[in-house]
Amino acid sequence: MVAAIKGYKMVVVMPMKMSKEKVYTMKALGAKIIRTQNDKSYDHPEGMIAGAHRIASQMKNAVVLDQFRNPNNPLSHYETTAEEILRDTGGKVDMIVLGCGTGGTASGIGRKIKEKCPSCKLVGADPFGSILAQPQSLNDVPENQISYNEVEGIGYSFAATTLDRNVIDQWGKCGDKDTFLMARRLIKSEGLLVGGSSGTAMHVACQAAKSLRPDQRCVVILADGVRNYLTKFISDEWMIEKGFLDEAEELEEMIQ
């Protein structure tokens, strides 16, 4: 949006798994889209990050915003998001659950919360297929996972420099099916038009919060909206095709 308003040329390098809606929106804003394979590592010349830097080096007066390395990423959450949580909870919060991608949200919130509420537990939600969770044994993909890494915005095959694992007290893993069913449940039952990574965070939160007392507070960060996923998990056909939704069960639920 800034590039469109300012008249800057914009090149967006993104993996193939990213939704059509994101591509259509950015093209409408005038951006050029370059797609990369999902399985390329961050330093692979054909991957999204190394690819972005390579493209920038071939252009005049180009800059790579690089949310994976930019210290302003976690700083923005340290100065704003964390302060909002503290303000709205009156400084009394016992657990915060959030998805991790670049780690900017987790690191920024975690650093501020540890200063103000040292006893607060920070729980990182990480999808299967990602290696961000610790210990590494958590990242083994169970045999019953029919697919993984369909969720966008969180979970990577590398840890960005903006991710400070030291502020995360506990990790929880979640598969695609549980992720998208939870996101659809939040939409249908709570009227919250959330995206897939919000389903991951809420699924992990439902497990982690079992350790809390009834009088304790748990904050869950629902970091994305539904707009970019209308052709993905919002679609019954897509869910059935991926094996995340049973057509017969869906019909029975509608009848009931």
Image (cartoon, rainbow, N blue to C red):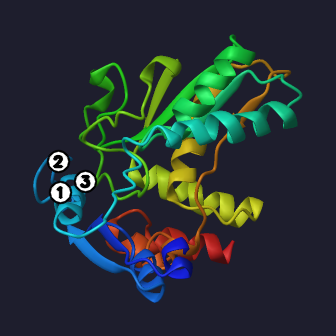
The number of discs equals 3
Residue farthest to the right, as pictured:
90
- The image quadrant that residue 14 belongs to is bottom left
Crowding around mark 2 (Cα neighbors within 10 Å: few <14, some 14 to 19, many 20+) is some
In terms of depth relative to the viewer, which is nearer, 17 or 8? 8
Mark 3 secondary-structure assignment: helix
2 or 1: tag closer to the N-terminus: 2
Q: CA distance from mark 2 to mark 1?
A: 6 Å
Residue 63 at what x, y percent from top left? 34, 59
Q: Secondary structure at mark 1?
A: loop
Residue holding disc 2: 41
Disc 3 residue type (three-letter): Ile
Q: Which three-letter amino acid code belongs to the residue tagged 2? A: Ser
Give the amino acid type for the residue marked by disc 1 in the picture: Gly
Residue holding disc 3: 49
Could you tell whether 135 is left or right of 51 in the image? right
Q: Is residue 99 visible?
A: no
Question: Measured from the top left, where is residue 200 in percent x and y?
Answer: 51, 47
- Using the image, determine if residue 160 lies above or below residue 187: above
Residue at the location (78% across, 39% down)?
84
Residue at 84 percent across and 24 percent down: it is 91
Distance from disc 3 to disc 1, alpha carbons, whole Å, reads: 6 Å
Task: Give how far across and how far down residue 242 sits, in percent.
Answer: 33, 67
Q: Which mark is residue 154?
A: none
Q: Disc 1 marks which residue?
A: 47
